[in-house]
Image (cartoon, helix red, strand yellow):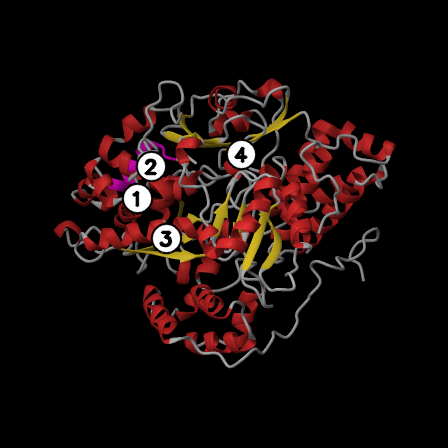
Amino acid sequence: MGQVGNFDPVLTKHVREPNSFTLDFYLQHGGYEALKTALGKTPDDIIALVTASGLRGRGGAGFPTGMKWKFVDKKAEPRYIVCNADESEPGTFKDHLLMERNPHLLIEGCAIGCYAIGAKVAYIYIRGEFFHVQTVLEQAIDDAYARGILGKNIFGSGFDCDVYVHRGAGAYEAGEETALLESLEGKRAQPRNKPPFPAVVGVYGKPTAVNNVETLCNVPSIVSKGAEWYASLGPEKNGGPKLYCVSGHVKRPGVFEASMNVTLRELIDGHAGGVRDGRTLKAVIPGGSSVPILMPDQLDTQASFDAIQKAGSLLGSAAIVVLDDTTCMVWLAENLLHFYRHESCGKCTPCREGTDWLHKILQRIERGEGQMRDLDLLASISGNIGGKTLCAFGDAAVTPVLTTLKYFRHEYEAHIKEGRCTLPAPWRAQHPVGAH
Amino acid sequence: MSFHPKMAYGATFHKSSRQLEDEGPAFVYTPENRARFDVIIQRYPPDRRRSAVLPALYLAQDQQGYITANAIRHVAELLGITRADVEDVVSYYTMFYTRPVGKYVINVCRTLSCAINGAERVTEELRGKLGIAPGETDASGTFTLMEVECLGACDRAPAVMVNDAWHECLTPENASKLVDDLRARGEEALSGCHHVIEKAGGAGG
């Protein structure tokens, strides 16, 4: 079920219960006590507590949250919390669960975050495709206002806090923090040059902390149970509870909460039920489509930020996509480059043009019309995108190409030599009509 | 024209495809939508009305089904920005339509986890059933079929989004049944299975 090993869930303990998303349920289970506790301390105390806990951002980069809050320029007014709920990294669906089944945890996290950095407004930027989640979240916010948990003079403390939901409209790039701020300002979701970082020049040119949903959901438990408790849940520098999204060719895909002591094997074989019957594991993407793949002999790697990085990949958004032996890796690269080509925001030339070129080459190799020199061309174009764009999208987009070339070059060569896809999967269309 | 000696320039994709938007009929918000707009605009600082462009466009699209030049003009006037500013946004975000779409827009997720669980077969079934290719609307104006990128429903793959509602764990058979249901029961058929999290793996659906 939701529990991995002996781990007692912190974020998703009650998500299966029928009314877990209501304010009454949340209050009955100790909800908003952390906010009361926080309001009794100074904002600097809260930042020190979060820093001591070692909480690292759950959106993908794993940057220490306490440090991010510390960097927020306290001289400029007003300041903002912007919650990144634009969950769009292929393979990721954890924030969806939190907002749909435990929305008050996020609201409490937003309010504590606002108090800590001296903001009065938090915007939750939610992707447009999560409309059914947005209605739950907005109802939760309305209920919180009605009980005086949001608004003016919260719990008689003199602290004012407003939380608003802002709906995106279909743009992966809006998940990049500066592109998200542009989108929130009513423009195209295209990244800004950094520095200045949002902590100094964020939304409306004001100091802003941009935090992922899961990150903010970790804050209330740190305030109520302490930094030491939090850090002790996982390995050093990888403390706290973590949500893992397991999807692909597994028997029981889903969100699993564990400490970062858990291994990829425990998550895939134990909790997601393993690869489907009669099939063997071919490769694993451990952190969303933007990170390098890991091979079956790396499954005993601990699913922590540091251990996955040491193994040659990244934990990213903890989106574990499991691929069985029916998966053609040339097709996989083509599928993902279709995604990146479509989602490239168009601001930086290497990414805008390069993703289109990569996709075209992959398409022709997949169709059996490639040539051996195309493999060098793929590597050359990838090398001219990675590290040459304003945001990390460029590096993300070339990863599926470079990682499949590294481990499965023989599949590319087989496509070219035999003039066809050598591994047509049973789950593909019976009469493919070509990419659109 | 090409920026690369071996590659044709992106003839179908990144090349500017700017078209003048359909003028459409005269457009102003209904009183209800104007009231909603007046609430939404309060969420942003008074000198940052432009922030409301996405919600303002959603209201226009809800009212008229798609975004016309007249709708863009109305939104621009309300926000105190230029028509070009609004058109810039409309042309960027995939959830705004600049041409009429069917009453039900079926968006099939085509990205990795849905694809390896059979999304192509769902699309194939819907193509056959509706007699239209992705990007097209049927002659009666009831259905539009689209292929979209990752919906964030990878644990319920393959997933489709019909208007704003999700339908998950699809097979060609139940995709076909969904179309029949929509024809028979209309919007009531838009339920989705995401509330049945007890059946899903992990901590929840």
Q: Which residue is mark 2?
A: A218
* Chain bearing mark 3: A
Q: Residue furthest left?
A: A156
- What's the chain of the residue with tag 4? A
Dot 3 or dot 2, earlier in sequence: 3
The answer to whether the residue labelled 1 contacts the one labelled 4, judged by CB atoms less than 8 Å apart, is: no
**Which image quarter holds the N terminus of chain B?**
bottom right
Q: Which residues are magenta?
A: A46-55
Q: Look at 69% across and 37% down and name the residue there.
A: A428
Q: Report the chain holding disc 1.
A: A
Q: Please tell me which residue lies in front, A306 or A263.
A: A263
Separation (CA) of disc 4 from disc 2: 19 Å
Q: Quadrant of residue B31?
A: bottom left
What's the distance in space between the residues labelled 1 and 4, CA to CA? Answer: 24 Å
Query: Crowding near pointer 2: few (<14 within 10 Å), some, many (20+)?
Result: many
Asked if the residue at tag 2 contacts the one at tag 1, i.e. Cβ–Cβ closer than 8 Å, the answer is: yes
Q: Which residue is mark 4?
A: A287
Give the numbered dot on residue A135.
Answer: 3
**Three-letter code for the amino acid on which mark 1 is drawn:** Gly
